[in-house]
Image (tube, grey):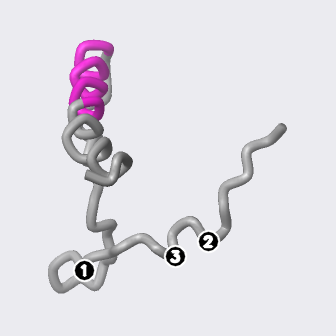
C-alpha cells in the first residue's frame, strides 16, 4: 500500500503571519531544523520531540 496524504490536511491548521512579509507559518511547530545533522544532535532532537509530546500532546489527546 502506498501512502497518500489527505488532500485537506492543512485546511483546519491555524496559521500566523510572520512579520510584515505575509508569510504564513503554522501556529505550532517544533522547529527541529537546527538540531539534526549528526547522531548526537539527532538524539537530542528526538528527546526534545518526546518532551514536547509529553508536555502538550498528551493533555490534548486525553482531553485534560
Residues drawn in magenta: 39-50
Q: Nearer the viewer, residue 63 or 27?
A: 63
Q: Is residue 38 above or below residue 18?
A: above
The answer to whether 29 is drawn above or below residue 17 in the figure is: above
Graded by Cα atoms within 10 Å as few (under 14), some (14 to 19) or many (20 or more), the crowding at tag 1 reads: few
Chief secondary structure of the magenta portion? helix
Q: 10 Å neighbourhood of mark 2: few (<14), some, or many (≥20)?
A: few
- Residue denoted by label 1: 17
Q: Position of residue 37 (x, y in %)?
A: 31, 25
Q: What residue lies at 24% left-to-right and 14% top-to-bottom?
A: 40
Label number found at residue 11: 3
Asked if marks 3 and 2 touch (Cβ < 8 Å), the reply is yes
Quarter of the image that includes the N terminus: top right
Quick one: SS at disc 3?
loop
Dot 2 and dot 1 residues touching (CB under 8 Å): no
* Viewer-nearest residue: 23 or 48: 48
According to the picture, the residue beneath numbered tag 2 turns out to be 8
Q: Nearer the viewer, residue 60 or 39?
A: 60
Residue at 31% across / 45% down in the picture?
A: 57
Q: Residue at x 31, y 42 (%)?
A: 58
Residue located 27% across and 59% down the image: 28
Amino acid at each position: 500500500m502506498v501512502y497518500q496524504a489527505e488532500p485537506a490536511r492543512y485546511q483546519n491548521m491555524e496559521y500566523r503571519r510572520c512579520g510584515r512579509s505575509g508569510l504564513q507559518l503554522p501556529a505550532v511547530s517544533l522547529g527541529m531544523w537546527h538540531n539534526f545533522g549528526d547522531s548526537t544532535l539527532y538524539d537530542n532532537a528526538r528527546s526534545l520531540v518526546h518532551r514536547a509530546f509529553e508536555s502538550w500532546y498528551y493533555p490534548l489527546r486525553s482531553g485534560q
